[in-house]
Image (cartoon, rainbow, N blue to C red):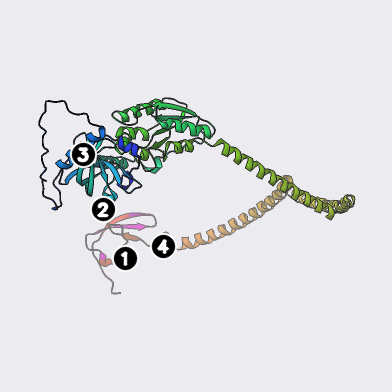
Amino acid sequence: MSDRNLTFDFDAGAAEAATPTSTSTSTPTSTEEPWPPAYPVAEVPKPVREEPGVLTVGELGRIVRGALDRSFAVPVFVEGEVVGARFASSGHVYFTLKDEAEDANLDVVLYRTSLTPRAKKAIVDGARVRLRGKPTFWAPRGRLQFVADRAEPAGRGALLEAIERLKEKLTAEGLFAPERKRKLPEDPRIIGVVTSAGGAVIHDICKVAARRGGARILLAPALVQGVGAAASVLRALEALQRVAEVDVIIVGRGGGAFDELLAFSDEALVRAIAACRVPVVSAVGHEVDVTLADFAADRRAATPSQAAEMLVPDRAAKKREALQLRGRLHRAVQGRLARERAELLRCVKELSDPRLLLAVHQQTKDDKDARLAAFAQRLVARRREGLATVRQRLAALHPGTVLAKEGAEVRRLEERMRVLVRTSLTRQASDLSRFGARLDAMSPLKVLGRGYAIATDEAGRAVRSAASLKTGDRVQVRVDQGRFSAAVLDVHEDDE
């Protein structure tokens, strides 16, 4: 939450009713005056025996003011947190200076003549400032106030710092993410309101709801400022969520000082608003007032009256809109009928006698019927010729015919095969006889029959040369009628 967003505006009555603040002094950064200042000690009047005189209120106020002026002849510095800053139309600025450590407040005024651009920028709700000036007694209001002639920033205030840290924490958790925002109901049945029962907020909401056409308002009264306000608002919010008929909830209060709106930046309340069962509209303070509840709510309204205008549909406006739409629809229908009527008249003028038009179409129909009949006859004739051809082909392919034809062919082939087999066998028998005779003529046995013999060595090899034998070798000798063994007695090699 930026310092600019925490610049609040409120009326004079609210400033006057602000909680008193404490004053705290610190060492000034400027060296214009000696520090600490030498405060003159007020003379203590000697006690008198007689009764004191009766003073008027004005006289007493002047005495108190004079005593303060004498006690603070030199300006002093005071430091604290700004609360409830208000820039008046006269150019003066009024606010309360709050002591964070103690429950003490001090009303401050900074006149236009002393308000520099730097001082104007420094005086923001929640900011910590260092002021130079003198305390005085303002008789018209009967209160002590500090008239400052210089203001300078002294860092952030503790309250603003705490709220800023909480905002950063909840933002990191995603409680303020835009995608979590829910759409408000267009025509809610019951609108729950969490606010003070005796404040102007509930009356403003009811007044706006009645003016816009009426809506059921269910109030959950709660404290909206002071000690226990956050817990009270939280309980009221939980109570409204238990009512099943409630469609949306307004959490609101009127404008106020910065410290009066702190309840709506309570962490537990902010989390409860983000987790609410139904959409929540935050209507806390005026348009310039910003709390953490505004970020957690589904919608933010500048004022409670604007929140009611958001939720309660304007029945009069809807009725006017419906009447306008009805008029536009009526005019559109009338225009469409006029155009269709003109088109019909044009068509009637262009068309001749309907009977003649029908006769022409009937003639065209008769011609097409005749052409269709002739085409059908030709098509049937072609189909009949094709059917006859198919029948002939089917007759030729009849199984009986095919089997008879194939049987004749098989018998012819069988006869031809028998002739070929007999011829082949005769030729092969002749060849066999011829080859047998030739083989028989070339058989070694025939040679043996003429008195020759075949000698083989012990390994069964035929002896072709006498040189392959030596004396004492045994040989087998085959003759035409049997075989016998022999021993080599002598080896003779022919000269050839």
Q: Which residue is mark 2?
A: 118
Instruction: State which quarter of the image contains the N terminus.
Output: top left
Q: Nearer the viewer, residue 119 or 432?
A: 119
Under tag 4, what secondary structure?
helix
User: Disc 2 or 1, which lies upstream in sequence?
Assistant: 2
Q: Which residue is mark 4?
A: 447
Mark 3 neighbour class, 10 Å CA radius: few under 14, some 14 to 19, many 20 or more: some
Q: Mark number for residue 65?
A: 3
Q: What's the residue type where badge 1 is placed? A: Arg
Q: Nearer the viewer, mark 1 or mark 4?
A: 1
Q: Are marks 4 and 3 in contact (CB under 8 Å)?
A: no
Q: What's the residue type where badge 2 is placed? A: Arg
Whole-number angstrom distance, CA of label 1 to CA of label 4 = 16 Å
Q: What's the residue type where badge 3 is placed? A: Arg
Q: What's the residue type where badge 4 is placed? A: Val
Q: Is residue 334 left or right of residue 360?
A: left
Q: Where is residue 73 shown, x and y percent of the image?
A: 15, 45
Q: Determine the residue positioned at 37% across, 58% down.
A: 479
User: Disc 2 or 4, which lies upstream in sequence?
Assistant: 2
Q: Where is residue 140 shown, x and y percent of the image?
A: 29, 37
Q: Is residue 384 left or right of residue 470?
A: right
Q: Where is residue 336 shown, x and y percent of the image?
A: 72, 48
Whole-number angstrom distance, CA of label 4 to CA of label 3 = 177 Å
Q: Which residue is mark 1?
A: 464
Whole-number angstrom distance, CA of label 2 to CA of label 1 = 145 Å
Q: Quadrant of residue 42?
A: top left
